[in-house]
Image: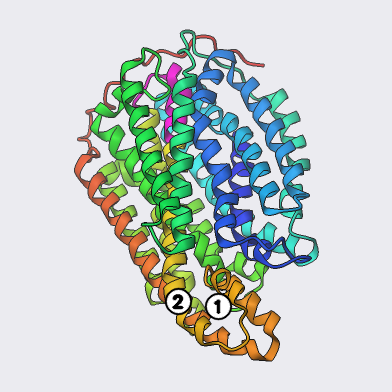
Amino acid sequence: MLMFTVLIMVLDHSVLNVAVKTIASPAPVGIGATQGELEWAINSYTLVFAALLFTAGLIGDRAGRRKTLLFGMAVFGAGSALAAFSGSSTELIAYRAVMGLGAAFVMPATLAVLMNVFERDEQPKAIGIWAGGVGIAIALGPLTGGLLLEHFWWGSIFLVNVPVVIVGFAAMALLIPDSRDPDPGRIDPVGVLLSVVGLVLLVYGIIHGGELASLSDRSVLLPLVGGLAVLAVFVVYEHRVDHPALDFSYFRNPAFSAAITATALAFLSMMGVAFFSVFYLQSVLGHSPLQAGLLVLPLAVAQSLFAPRARLAVARFGAKATCTAGMVMIATGLACFAFFDASTPLWALELAFFVQGAGMGHVMSPVTVTVMQALPREKAGVASAINNTFRQIGGALGVAVLGSLLSAAYRGGIESTLERAPGVPDEARHAAGESLEATLAVAERLGPAGQVLIAPAHEAFLVAMHLAALCAATVTLVGAVVVATYLPGRRKPGTGSPPVPDERPAAGVTRG
């Protein structure tokens, strides 16, 4: 049942990835979303999700994890129904935020319940299966999205969540045991507010900077500096308050910090590349949404195959060697995009996706085990919240930073062509330079005269994609250095598991 819950949350995200090109298309096919609006449609969900995970985890520890699961599923289903019928990009962004609110109450509870149901020696296997479920969801998402977009309007990718949520809600109410922390922490509303404001300002500045292809504009600098200042205040406040939303003392454990860093950097790179790879597959290579979904299958299949078996590699080689190799594999797969163009054979593309998925399978499971076992069982909700928060922050920054880098590099490559092209209205030149889809939309409106824009647009996009891919690979290699330095190596036979603060079964566990 927990796997079913995870599948719904991740499936929604992977479904949206394959649909961004359709949503960017002018009405009636899509809603004409700009690249910046598409980034916000992804990040409004991610930021609300990340910002509320600590609070949601504490509420689950206090009120009971099954109750928070059911509440989160209900809110997620309502947000999905509203998003399906969005009439504008603004509405879609707002309803995606509602979905993020629901997801924030679901994800921490899944790992928390798992840690309380399974004993310590069973937890790596259970978490491996949990991580493999993410791979299955990644596989089903693009396929589901592609099939829906082949036969229905773009809103169907959200509406399909509703019946799934209804079935899942009923099953969870009957099958999932309840558990809570007998000594839950107090909620920190000031810390939550500071984290939300700081992250939103920072991400807004990054995305807006990409739209303008400049970081020196006042409208970019103010939110960037403001966001960093608010986040600095958040860190100081959390160190001084006696009930912090994020307890920084957990990060004194080097293995815990390294695992969190690896999670954040891996998702930063993977989510950023996933965002622009959709346009590469559909706009440059000319594949349909369904075909694009099928092409991503090797990534998902590899992750679902290797994640449950990563514990065997950890047992033989240690977490340090396993995760370092996984991060290097991810970086290799991402770096391949720096060499792809309009004539790249499909086998090369499929191999790159498979290597990425295999790498994620050998990273996600071991680092999650490290994080979850670093805290006592009754604090499983907090550990899960921290793990998911940094994963989501990494993903949000990946879409924002790499998406903005892509947008700025693309504008630099296409601007001179737009200035020379006859028939392009002056007011359309700036908008057309924001993204490949915007340029192609202008070319279509111009008819035969717009054909001169298509080849330069593809070339400018490929150059921008190559730059973004190399940046993503470099970030992932930084993560490889971190895990190689701080994660524990192979344990000698007979040494057993490292001590943890509390091995006792969590109090308050009931079976309903």
Q: Nearer the viewer, residue 305 or 235?
A: 235
Magenta stretch, overall SS = helix
Picture layout, residue 335 above or below residue 269: below
Asked which quadrant contains residue 352, the reply is: bottom left
Label 2 sits on what residue type? Leu
Residue 283 is left or right of residue 220, and the answer is right
Q: Nearer the viewer, residue 26 or 19?
A: 26
Q: Are marks 1 and 2 in contact (CB under 8 Å)?
A: yes
- At x 44% / y 29%, what residue is drawn? 194
Which quadrant is the C terminus positioned in?
top right
Q: Position of residue 150 (x, y in %)?
A: 75, 67
Identify the disc placed on residue 284.
Answer: 1
Between the residue at mark 1 and the residue at mark 2, the CA separation in whole angstroms equals: 9 Å
Label 1 sits on what residue type? Val
- At x 52% / y 72%, what residue is drawn? 433
Picture layout, residue 90 above or below residue 425: above
Which of the marked residues, 1 or 2, is nearer the chain's N terminus?
Answer: 1
Confirm whether the magenta stretch covers residue 319: no
Magenta span of residues: 374-387
Can residue 222 be seen?
yes
- At x 24% / y 27%, what residue is drawn? 252
Q: Position of residue 447 (x, y in %)?
A: 70, 87
Residue bearing mark 2 = 462
